[in-house]
Image (tube, rainbow, N blue to C red):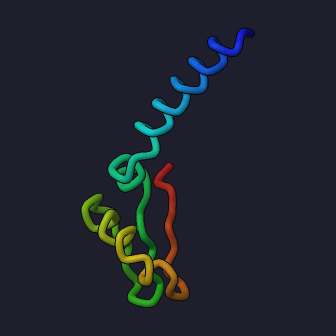
Amino acid sequence: MTPKALEQEVSLLHQLLQDVESVDNIAYAHEILDLNRFKRITEHHRVKHFFRMRRQLEKPFVFLSNKN
């Protein structure tokens, strides 16, 4: 594989992962389990809010769970 072809493959892979790993897509694919309040948060806009407020995810017994 030539260096130019390798660079093109890396560029395409980076573009693909950037689209897949966006905050919107992660919020749709995950939910928050808050065992302190016995709540499951599944709305994507509220999950995005939890990502922005990292202190809430660092609390004990608050988990990020994949919906799959």
Residue 9 point in image, percent of width and height: 59, 19
Q: Is 16 positioned to the left or the right of 42 in the image? A: right
Q: Is 37 positioned to the left or the right of 68 in the image? A: left
Residue 53 point in image, percent of width and height: 36, 77
Q: Is residue 63 above or below residue 22?
A: below
- Residue at position x 61%, y 21% from top? 7
Q: Is residue 18 above or below residue 1?
A: below
- Residue at position x 42%, y 52% from top? 26
Given residues 44 and 49, the one toward you in this image is 49
Image quadrant holding the N terminus, namely top right
- Residue at position x 27%, y 62% from top? 43
Q: How many marks?
A: 0
Q: Residue furthest front?
A: 3
Residue 38 point in image, percent of width and height: 41, 84
Given residues 36 and 15, the one toward you in this image is 15
Given residues 27 and 21, the one toward you in this image is 21
Residue 31 point in image, percent of width and height: 41, 63
